[in-house]
Image (spheres, rainbow, N blue to C red):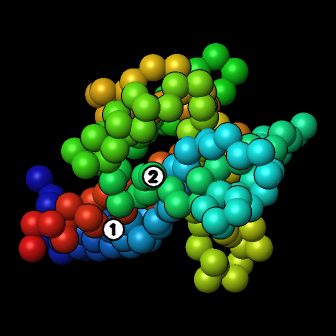
Amino acid sequence: MNFCPSRFNTYLLLTALLAAGCQSDQSKAEKQEAKKLSALRINIETKDDNLGMGADGTTTTIQFPRIDPVNITIQREPILSEAQVGQASVMATPGGCAVLIQFNSSGALTLEQFTASNPGKHLVIFGEWGDPKDKKDTNSLTARWLAAPLISHRIANGVLSFTPDATRAESDRFVLGLNNVARNMKKKEMQ
């Protein structure tokens, strides 16, 4: 039986090098994904007769959705942000997708308090995702009002779900950034 150990070792070496190269590309891509961040602002609707800025500057009027928009007057200060997100996900729904956000304990308490005391008003959700430094992609930063779900009941479980005014790809990118922020916040808490 003829056996050529040098050829075998060459094939083994090439296989190992290719595998190492693939791993470094994969880890590089994972590192790039981990750097993507998103911002979230959830404001509460207010009934302001002055449409626009309130007399004390605490309210503002936004237009939502992008197609056939209506004016919604909101409190200028958000009640929740990405800092209170524990985990986010995108779920397929008939005709689109929904974003589910599980808030951490302080965010869940805030969500419960505001939904219990404001039935019939809207939670107005703003999102921002993308990289303003990405010169290759001219649409690399997206920021807009995503949803305005009506508060119909107290949300005691800390989970907010809404249908965003966004594509599935945009929703996936938004959620990826929220989860990265949540992971970074947990790391900071552990230190």
Q: Which numbered tag is attached to residue 170? A: none
Which residue occupies the foreground of this view, 15 or 76?
A: 76
Percent of width and height locating residue 154:
39, 24
Percent of width and height locating residue 83:
35, 60
Percent of width and height locating residue 67:
87, 40
The amino acid on which the numbered mark 1 sits, given as a three-letter code, is Ser
The count of marks equals 2
Regarding mark 2 in the picture, which secondary structure is present there?
loop
**30 lies left or right of 143:** left
Residue at horizontal 56%, vertical 39%? Answer: 123
Q: Which numbered tag is attached to residue 27? A: 1
Residue 29 versus residue 148 in the image, above or below: below
Q: Is residue 168 visible?
A: no
Quadrant the C terminus occupies: bottom left
Residue identifier under label 2: 79
**30 lies left or right of 132:** left
The amino acid on which the numbered mark 2 sits, given as a three-letter code, is Ile
Which residue occupies the foreground of this view, 165 or 139?
A: 165
Structural crowding at the residue carrying mark 1, measured as other residues with C-alpha within 10 Å and reported as few (<14), some (14–19) or many (≥20): few
Percent of width and height locating residue 171:
58, 45
Quarter where residue 21 is shown: bottom left
